[in-house]
Image (cartoon, rainbow, N blue to C red):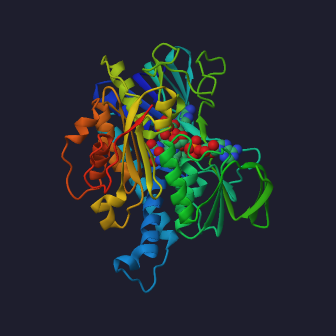
Amino acid sequence: MADRYDLVVIGAGPAGYTAAIRAAQLGLKVVCVDDWQTASGEPALGGTCLNAGCIPSKALLETSELFAHARDHGPTYGLKFKELLLDLTAMLAHKDKVVSELTRGIATLFQANGVTWISGRGKLLPKNIVEISGKIQQQIESEYVILASGSVPVGLKSAPFDGQRIVDSQGALEFKEVPPRLGVIGAGVIGLELGSVWHRLGAEVVLLEAQETFLSMADEQIAREALKQFNAQGLDIRLGARVLESKVENNSVTVRYQDKNGEHTEQVDKLIVAVGRRSNTAGLMADDSKLLLDEWGFVHVDEYCRTNLPKVYAVGDLVRGPMLAHKGMEEGVMVAERISGRETKVNYDVVPSVIYTHPEIAWVGKTEQALKAAGTTCRSGMFPFAANGRARAMGQAAGFIKVLADFHTDRVLGVHLIGPHCSELVAPAALAMSFGASNEDIMLTMFAHPTLSEALHEASLAVAGHAIHMAQPRKGTIKQ
Ligand code: FAD
Ligand code: NAD
C-alpha cells in the first residue's frame, strides 16, 4: 500500500526545500523527494542553488575578487606582498566545503522540522500519487503536491557540451587550472559572473553575445556603465556575435562566429556555454499527464502557483518569472501557507536582481526604459559613489545609484545600482518599495555615516533636486 502524506514536494532546491520546511512548520506531514547527487554519488539537498549555482559561484567570486583586489590595488593601499600566489586547489576546496556544510544544513533543518527526505526521482501520476524511482521504489499518495524540479542549462547545437572543453556553468566551477584563454557564449548573468572569476585569476576572457544590446534586462544607464567598467577590466565582450560552429581539437576549441563585420574564429582552451536555462520537466509527470505547460515549456501556474490540476502547485525555476532562488523561496512559502489556509501572496513587483560582478549590479522595480514605454512620467535622481566617503575609503568609487519615482505620486518605482556591495544595498530599496514608500520617505530616513547606503539617501535627495554631496546638485530630471 502507498504511504500517505499531506504534501509531497518534488525537488529540494530553494523553492522546494523552503516549501517543505514551511509546510512542516504549519503542521503538515511532508515528504520531499530529490534526485541530486554529488560527483561521488552522495545525495545532497539544496538543488542547483546550493550545489552548482548561487553558493559555489559566490564562493569563487568572493575569493577571486580578494585575490585580484590584493594583486591589482594592494600597493595603492600600502599593502605590499613579496609574492601573492594563487592556490586554486585550496580555493576549490573552500568552495566545496561551503557547499557541503550548507547542503548538510538543509538536512538538519528537515530533521528538525520533521520533513521526510527521500533520495530518488519523483513522477506525478493521476490522483496526486507520486511514483519514486531510484534506490527506493515506492508510491506515495498525497493530498497536495508541489512540483519544484527547477531548471537545466540550455545547450547549443553549434557548441555541444563535452564536459571537458565545452562546459556548462557547473563545469565552469570545477576547472582544475586557470585556462589561459577562456571563451564564454552568452554575456548574461552566468557568463559575466563566471567569466569574471576566471579573468580575475588570470585568464584572457572573450564573451560572445548574440544580442546587439548589452544586458538588455537592466536599466540602460546601468548597462552602459557596466560595459565601460568590464571593458576597462579587460573582459572582451563582443556583441551581436552568433556562434556558427565549435570544434574541439588538440586540447583547444576553435569557435567560428559571425557578427555584422563578417565571420571570425577564436581559439580558446575552454568554452563555457551560458545562454540561459529552461524548466526541468523531463520525466516529471506521466506521458498522458494533463498538466498544462506554457508556450516556453514552463509549468503553467496562476499568481498563487496553482497548476491546472487540483491541489497540484508548481514553484521556482519550473514556472514563469525570473530564475532566482529568492523568487522560488517566496513562492515555496506562499504555497505552503496557502495550503494551510493562509492568504499569503508574493509581491512580484518587488523582486531584487543582482549580478555579482565587480562592480556589483543590482536593481529592483522598473527600469527607466520600461517606465517610458508604459508612458509613466517619473523623476530620476542619481548619485555617484565617487562622492561617497565610504566608497572612496574602500577604493571602490566607481558606479552610482539611481532612484526613479512617480512624478505625480512620488512613489518609488525603481532603484538601480552599480558599485560596491550593491547586492546588499538593493535590500533597503526593496524594503522601501515593498512598503509602498514614496521618495520622500527615503529622503526623511537617517542613514549611518560613513556608509555606502548614504548613496541611496543622496540619490533619493537628488530626485528632489537637493543632494548634499554633489558639487552641482542636479534637479530631479523629469522623464516622460
Ligand atoms: P533547483 O535549484 O534547480 O532545484 C531543483 C531540484 O529538483 C534539484 O535538486 C533537482 O535535482 C531536483 N529534481 C529535478 N527533477 C526531479 C525529479 N523528477 N524528482 C526528484 N528531484 C528532481 N539565483 C539567485 O537568486 N542568486 C544567485 O546568485 C544565483 N546564482 C546562480 C549561479 C549559477 C551558476 C546558476 C546555474 C544559477 C544561479 N542562480 C542564482 C539561479 C538559482 O540557482 C535558481 O533560480 C534556483 O536554484 C531555482 O530553485 P528551484 O528550487 O526552482 O530549482
Ligand atoms: P541569461 O538569460 O542571463 O543570459 C544568457 C545570455 O546568452 C543572454 O544575454 C542571451 O542574449 C545570450 N544568448 C542566448 N543565445 C545565444 C547564442 N546562441 N549565442 C550567444 N549568446 C546567446 O542566462 P544565464 O546567464 O545562462 O543564466 C540563467 C539563469 O540563471 C538566469 O535567468 C539567471 O536569472 C539565473 N542566474 C542568476 C544569477 C544571479 O542572480 N546572480 C546568477 C547566475 C544565474
Instruction: Give whichever of 429, 476 is nearer the camera.
Output: 476
As drawn, 286 above or below 371: above
Find residue 24 and report its image quarter: top left
Relative image position of residue 378 (x, y in whole percent):
39, 32
Q: Residue at x 51, y 53 (%)?
A: 226
Count of residue discs? 0
Q: Would residue 136 be visible to someone looking at this image?
A: no
Q: Looking at the image, in which quadrant does ligand 2 appear? A: top right
Left or right of 70? Residue 155 is right
Left or right of 332? Residue 473 is left
Relative image position of residue 321 (x, y in whole percent):
50, 31
Q: Would residue 471 be visible to someone looking at this image?
A: yes
Q: Residue at x 35, y 38 (%)?
A: 110
Relative image position of residue 472 (x, y in whole percent):
33, 53
Instruction: Give whichever of 214, 64 is nearer the camera.
Output: 214
Q: Residue at x 32, y 59 (%)?
A: 387
Instruction: Give whichever of 75, 114 is nearer the camera.
Output: 75
The C terminus is located in which quarter? Answer: top left
Relative image position of residue 23 (x, y in whole percent):
34, 27
Instruction: Give whichever of 318, 347 is nearer the camera.
Output: 347
